[in-house]
Each structure stands twice: as structure tokens, then as C-alpha cells.
Amino acid sequence: MQKSTSLFKQKKIYFSALVAIFIFSICYLLINGKEAGFISLSSYHPFWLNVFFINYTFMGNGIFAICLIGFVLFYFKRKKLGFGLLYAFFISGIATQILKNLFNSSGPKLYFEAGTYLNFVDGVTVSGNSDFTSGHTATAFAIATVLVLLLKSKNLQLLILMGAALVGYSRIYLAQHFLLDVIVGACLGSMSGIAAVYFANNIIGLKWSFKKIHRLPVGESPNAIQTA
């Protein structure tokens, strides 16, 4: 518990900024509402932003997550970080699918009547039903939380958070989700990332301790590990 508390204190910049984003987003949603909030956030569509977000939204895709996990595990050989990312991907993915099936919600394309909102990005297939909770956003924030908690560098905290937040905004910009879906996805992903780090620290640690105990000479107490 003490180790976890210390870890959060070291990453207070990330989590303080994350809470600030949540508060601002919720206030924005309450003030503007679902429909007006979506239109105001996705009404400006220059060509260069279209190209950027069409490609950048892939950063929250499952294929990207799997490639990143494989790269960390097999190229960098960072076992704890790799398993942390793997746990985060699975936890956030399962939780997202549960919510999508519990709440059958229409996406922006089906929500607006014909002619009400025409500023969709050309060439982007807009999803329809089962859109409550953004899976891309959940994956992005799950990965970001694990990276922040398990990487030693403190200078990357805001950069990583900005990267995850841009994935969330890309889902609104491309008319895949409403702001509420993105907020829930970010919250879900952040909690999944925290849980994944806990599992990575404890499960890997338990396996290591188990192997070490079985290497002890016959008759030696396991307590010797702690006093050594």
C-alpha cells in the first residue's frame, strides 16, 4: 500500500491534470448538453485536421495496442511494463464491451436527423448503435496510465496525457462518439490502467518470490529471504 501511495505521489502531475480534464469535460457537457456539445466540438474540419485525426485515432485501436505490447515485451524486454500494458488492454476491452452491451446507444450519425448536422468527415465510416463508451479512448487512457505509472521519467507525464486526450477528441471529431462516451471511456481506461499496474506488480512479484523460495536449500526457512 505504501509503495502504491508513493507511486501516485510521484505521478501527481499526470493525475492532477487528468482530474482537471474530467472536471472541465463534465462541466462543458452539463452547460452545452449532448447535441450542442458535440456540434461545438466537431464543427471545424479543415483538410489537414481531417488527415491528422483519421490517422491519429488509430493510436487507440486494438491492433496498435497489441503491436506496442509485443514491442515492449520482445524488443525492449520490459516484462513488468509489457504485462501491465497487456492487463490494461484486456481489462479495458472487457469492461468496454460489457457497457456497450448493457447500454444500446445511438452514435452521432444516427442521433441527428437528415440535414441537422452535415459536417461529417468524408471517407470516414461512422458507427451506429452500441456506441456508449469509446473503446478507442478507453484503450488509449489505459495504456497512458500504465506508461506513466511504470516509466521512471517524470517529464513525459503531460505529453502522454495529451496523447491519450487527443485520441478521445478524435472520436468526437470523426463523429464516432459523443463527449459523454469519451468521458466514460477515459475514466474506464484510467481505472483499468491502475488495476493493471497493481496486477503487474503483484502477480509478477509473487511468481518471482515463489521461484526464489523453491531455490532455497532444504531446511532453510523462507523468512531468510526477508532477513537477507
Image (tube, grey):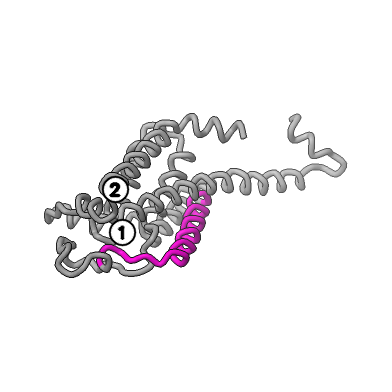
Relative to the observer, which residue lies in front, 57 or 101? 101
| 3D distance between C-alphas at marks 2 and 1 | 14 Å
Residue type (three-letter) at the residue carrying disc 1:
His
Residue 83 picture location, percent across and down: 53, 51
Q: Residue at x 56, y 35 (%)?
A: 4
Instruction: Based on the picture, tell me whether residue 216 belongs to the magenta stretch.
Output: no
Q: Nearer the viewer, residue 71 or 198?
A: 198
Would residue 79 be found to the left or right of residue 35 on screen? right
The percent coordinates of residue 196 (x first, y second) are 53, 49
Asked if the magenta segment contains residue 87, the reply would be yes
| Residue labelled with disc 1 | 177
- Determine whether label 2 and label 1 are within 8 Å by CB: no
**Residue at screen point 37% across, 57% down:** 134
Is residue 193 rendered to the left or right of residue 161?
right
Residue 127 location, quadrant: bottom left
Residue carrying label 2: 166
Under mark 2, the amino acid is: Leu
Front residue of 117/216: it is 117
The mark nearer the N terminus, 2 or 1, is: 2
Question: How far from the left and from the top, in percent, is residue 202?
Answer: 62, 45
Which portion, as a residue range, is magenta?
83-109
